[in-house]
Image (cartoon, rainbow, N blue to C red):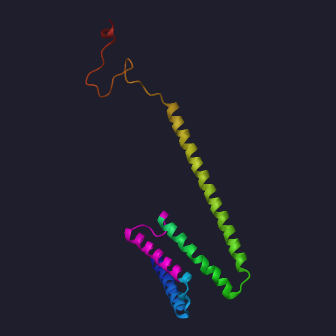
Amino acid sequence: MFRRLAAALGGLLVLFHLWLFGSQLLDGRLTELGPVLRWLMAGGLVAALAGLHRRGASLFKGRKAISIWLLAALLHGPAMAGAGSAYESPALAEVVTALVQIAAASVTLGLGLTLLAGLRRRLLFLRLVIARAVGRRRPRPFEPGRSLVSASRPPPSRASLAF
């Protein structure tokens, strides 16, 4: 069920971008260098995602996938900024500012929580290491009265060691 929904949403996204490319082509906006470069970069990002899929890697998890999606988000930035000029919306700048503030606060909070979790894990690990080192005394291998488990015969008696 979820795969069908994800495939349908992905198909709609592809159709929207094909419609957008066609409308820009028919309007003559692809004679400018900026939109052409953005479409070429978009093609490169699609090729990178296809390469990840071909290798069997996840398209949403991992450093490479996240970096590709971040580049795609950056690629949409000029398109979003240009959309405000067509509609003459004065509230667009406020919305963008609010979104940047929310994103910055979320990233800061996430990094802080990750740092705290790492510190807690490290402190817990150090406590376990110290407890293990202090709690157990390792026997010396040649203490009198002890024999090695893998020895073929018992150790010599104390009387035979005296001179």
Q: Residue at x 65, y 67 (%)?
A: 103
Residue extending farthest to the left is 152
- Which sits in the foreground, 115 or 40? 40
Q: Is residue 35 above or below residue 48?
A: below
Q: Is residue 67 magenta?
A: no
Q: Residue at x 44, y 28 (%)?
A: 138
Q: Residue 105, position in %: x, y?
A: 67, 63
- State how many labels appear: 0
Residue extending farthest to the bottom is 26
Tell me the quarter of the picture where residue 148 sits: top left
- Which sits in the foreground, 65 or 160? 65
Left or right of 87 in this view: 60: left
Q: Is residue 40 magenta?
A: yes
Q: Residue 131, position in %: x, y?
A: 53, 35
Q: Is residue 93 above or below residue 131?
A: below
Q: Is residue 91 above or below residue 62?
A: below
Q: Which span is picked out in magenta?
A: 36-63
Left or right of 112 in this view: 150: left
* Any part of residue 71 in sight: yes
Q: Residue at x 56, y 93 (%)?
A: 27
Q: Quadrant of the C terminus?
A: top left
Q: Residue at x 65, y 64 (%)?
A: 106
* Any part of residue 62 in sight: no
Q: Is residue 116 above or below residue 51?
A: above
Residue extending farthest to the top is 163
Q: Residue 70, position in %: x, y?
A: 55, 69
Q: Magenta-highlighted stretch: main secondary structure? A: helix
Q: Residue 33, position in %: x, y?
A: 54, 83
- Which sits in the foreground, 123 or 26? 26
